[in-house]
Image (cartoon, rainbow, N blue to C red):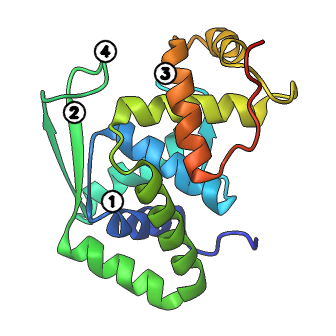
Amino acid sequence: MEPNVLSPRAVLLIALEAMGGDVHGRTLLQKRMYFVGELLGEDLGFRSHFYGPYSSLIHSEAVQASTLGLLLETSSTGPCIPCESRRVDYVLSDSGRDTAKRAEAMQTSEAEDIRKAVNRLMEACGSLDGASLSIAAKVHYILTRSSDGPMTPEEIRQKAKMLRWDVPEEKVIAGVDSLLALNLVKLVKTEH
């Protein structure tokens, strides 16, 4: 795949528009964008972080888009990932939608790839909350960055511990199921 010609902000806005224009929670935004990047084969700056893969680039773009009025950011103390004190929701403003549409018109092929990636993600994992998608992202991150080949759920848990992630085995299995639905992993060893 050719490298991204769209700016990271345009990718974010097009992806958000394809997601229906809103995302409930920073963690959910991060994890959805992680999978969009993986499905596109694009590096959106994701690295290991407490809640799983995290991109300071995506965070920065969301903050800047909010400052520019492209995103409306609201916070609440509603349901969020454990240890987060508040949930931050993002909604595309009319200006954000217009900006996304202009970016799509300039790079229609790339925009279509983003929309296809979002559609795949939403079909396979759209009902997952931030916590569940976070587990799936952690499992994917471990499986794709490990040179150990296929791993059992227990081996994935051990790798997660090395990254200071606590992932219960049943959540690993659910995460693998999400990755299989996205066709992002091919092989996971089963316990003997």
Residue 18 percent location from the top left of the image: 37, 69
Q: Nearer the viewer, mark 1 or mark 3?
A: 3
Q: Which mark is on residue 65? A: 1
- Measure the C-alpha gap from mark 1 to mark 2: 18 Å
Cα distance, mark 4 to mark 1?
A: 26 Å
Q: Residues within 10 Å of mark 2 (few under 14, many from 20)?
A: some
Label 2 secondary element: strand
Residue at 46% across, 90% down: 105
Three-letter code, disc 2: Arg
Precedes in sequence: disc 4 or disc 3: 4
What residue does disc 4 label? 83
Q: Please give the label number shown on residue 168.
A: none
Q: In terms of secondary structure, where does tag 4 sit?
A: loop
Q: Secondary structure at mark 1?
A: helix
Side of 61 relative to 141 (left or right): left
- Amino acid type for the residue under numbered disc 1: Ala
Which residue is identified by label 3? 171
> Callout 4, which amino acid?
Cys
Q: Quadrant of residue 40?
A: bottom right
Residue 82 versus residue 118 in the image, above or below: above
Q: Residues within 10 Å of mark 3 (few under 14, many from 20)?
A: some
